[in-house]
Image (cartoon, rainbow, N blue to C red):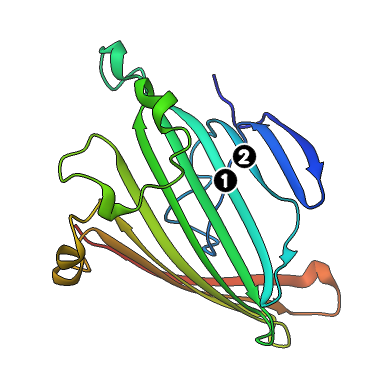
Amino acid sequence: RDWSSDVCSSDLGGPAEVSFGGENLSWGPARRYPILLGNSAPGFAHVRVGTRKPVNVGIGALDVDLLWGRLDESPQFDTVTGNDHRLLTGFFAQLDLRGLEGLSLGVAGVQHNRWTEAKAKWLNLYTFPFNEGQHTEGNGLVSVTATWRLEESRADVYAEWARDDYWTDLGDLLREPDHTQGYLLGLEKLVRHGTSRSEEHTLNSSHGYISY
């Protein structure tokens, strides 16, 4: 089933909400080609718990999403029915810093494991990579982001760095920090050619790199 057009949301009180369905999710600052989650493919069945709007936490405004979903294998991939589904868990948090107008910092992580382990792994929102064995059937990705919105210039400058695969220990991370990394640098600017909003155009430029 194509879940990309289905969604149902409900308030949990205060700034929190829960949603069920399969709408596309986009995490991170990238307008095109986001590293972790984007809208380049149909959505998947998921439950999301998070904030409807940023919450004041003193040093800034915090926006949080927690995610649980089921990934379905394409029928064209293989004929083995025992591996058709995976459990996806993830989190996303973004902080709009107080005193630094327009600057936002974020961190996100997603992890997938065998669907048969869902009962044991569903609270495992993101296993810190140091806790994973060298040979695991799951996989995790983590990213950090920064966005600076320049209101007067009507422009956004953003960056994202992400890493795939677990590292065995701190020494492994320090020796090969660029192993399976990816990064994205981007600039978006709104340009008005006339006096009306219908004559506004968005200029978008980005550069990315992925290593293995």
**Mark 2: few/some/many CA within 10 Å (<14, 14-19, 20+):** many
Distance Cα–Cα, label 1 vs label 2 = 6 Å
**Residue 191, image x, y percentages:** 69, 78
Q: Are marks 1 and 2 in contact (CB under 8 Å)?
A: yes
Taking the spot 29% from the left edge, 14% from the top edge, the residue there is 82
Q: Is residue 106 shown left or right of residue 82?
A: right
Pointer 2: what residue?
Answer: 48
Q: Nearer the viewer, residue 32 or 28?
A: 28
Taking the spot 48% from the left edge, 45% from the top edge, the residue there is 90
**Mark 1: few/some/many CA within 10 Å (<14, 14-19, 20+):** some
* Disc number for residue 66: 1
In the rendered image, the vertical position of residue 116 relative to residue 124, given as above or below: above
In the rendered image, the vertical position of residue 26 relative to residue 47, given as above or below: below
Residue 139 showing in the rendered view: yes
**Residue 163, image x, y percentages:** 31, 59
Q: Is residue 84 shown left or right of residue 71?
A: left
Q: How many marks?
A: 2
Taking the spot 73% from the left edge, 88% from the top edge, the residue there is 152
Quadrant of the image containing the C terminus: bottom left
Q: Amino acid at mark 2?
A: Arg
**Residue 130, image x, y percentages:** 26, 55
Taking the spot 37% from the left edge, 37% from the top edge, the residue there is 112
State the SS at label 1.
strand
In the rendered image, the vertical position of residue 106 relative to residue 19, given as above or below: below
State the SS at label 2.
strand
Q: Amino acid at mark 1?
A: Leu
Q: Quadrant of residue 195?
A: bottom right
